[in-house]
Amino acid sequence: MSHDFPPPSLDQQERMVEAILFASAVPVTMRDLTARMPDGCDPAEALAALRRRYDGRGVTVEHLGDGYAFRTAPDLAFLMQEQTVESRRLSRAAIETLAIIAYHQPVTRAEIEEIRGVAVSRGTLDQLIEMEWVRMGRRRMSPGRPATFVVTDGFLDHFGLETSRDLPGLSELRAAGLLDSRPPAEGLAMPLAGRGEDDDIEHVDPPEDLFKDT
């Protein structure tokens, strides 16, 4: 966009960012803000001002993956419980596969199977991809050039994570009953608890709100 007049004031730019985020159904990246706003604007400064304005309010501007979005303040999430629709539960196989991808990305299918100790069905990966929580990554520069899998910004958004580095640590996962309390075996970075020979039998129930598709 080109203009023959000075760029909008910071207050006006802040309002523009607010309008763009409010109207978007998905997190908006800084590149998107720059493309939509007039020349001469400073989206980063306007966004920082907007985040300060909403600090401590009922909604906040959250950094999710590569983008930014309005989200309910964490301490007020209980007010939304009645509006939560009933969601399908992921199988134990899908939970384990998703966790391995999140913690070991980029990871190949063979590596997922090595960590789990059992084969990964095509349907499990298809489900995670269909939910837009997992996507294909770059192919490995190794024999056969196997495809890799990584989690998406949609996964980070769903769980309120800025990056995958914000995932809970091993002690937190063990406390939730999702990891074996024994030390990991050699070559196994995440010994997931409750895995049996059957791909979809849940031997250990995860917390009710863990890995739910809402």
Image: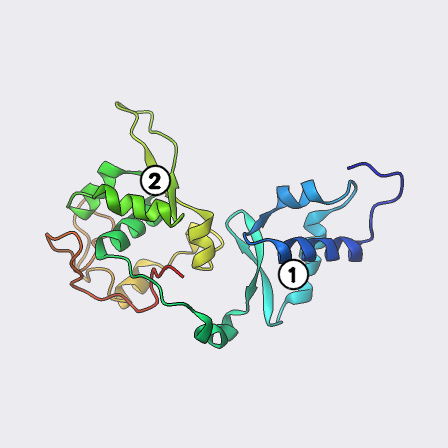
Nearer mark to the viewer, of 2 and 1: 2
Asked if residue 201 is positioned above or below residue 120 in the image, the reply reads: below
- Categorize mark 1 by other alpha carbons within 10 Å: few (<14), some (14-19), many (20+): some
User: Is label 1 in a helix, a strand or a loop?
Assistant: helix
Q: Nearer the viewer, residue 210 or 49?
A: 210
**Residue at the image position 26 percent from the left and 52 percent from the top:** 94
Q: Nearer the viewer, residue 169 or 85?
A: 85
**Mark 2 or mark 1, which has the lower sequence index?**
1
Q: Which residue is mark 2?
A: 149
Query: Going by the picture, which residue comes out furthest to the left?
Result: 197
**Residue at the image position 89 percent from the left and 38 percent from the top:** 4
Counting from the top left corner in percent of width and height, residue 141 is at 33, 25
Q: Which numbered dot is residue 66?
A: none
Q: Quadrant of residue 55?
A: bottom right
Res 105 seen here? yes
Res 106 seen here? no
User: Is label 2 in a helix, a strand or a loop?
Assistant: strand
Query: Going by the picture, which residue comes out furthest to the top?
Result: 143
Horizontal arrangement in the rendering, residue 87 relative to residue 197 (left or right) = right
**Residue at the image position 12 percent from the left and 55 percent from the top:** 196
Q: Which numbered dot is residue 51?
A: 1
Q: Quadrant of residue 168?
A: bottom left
| Marks 2/1: CA–CA distance | 33 Å
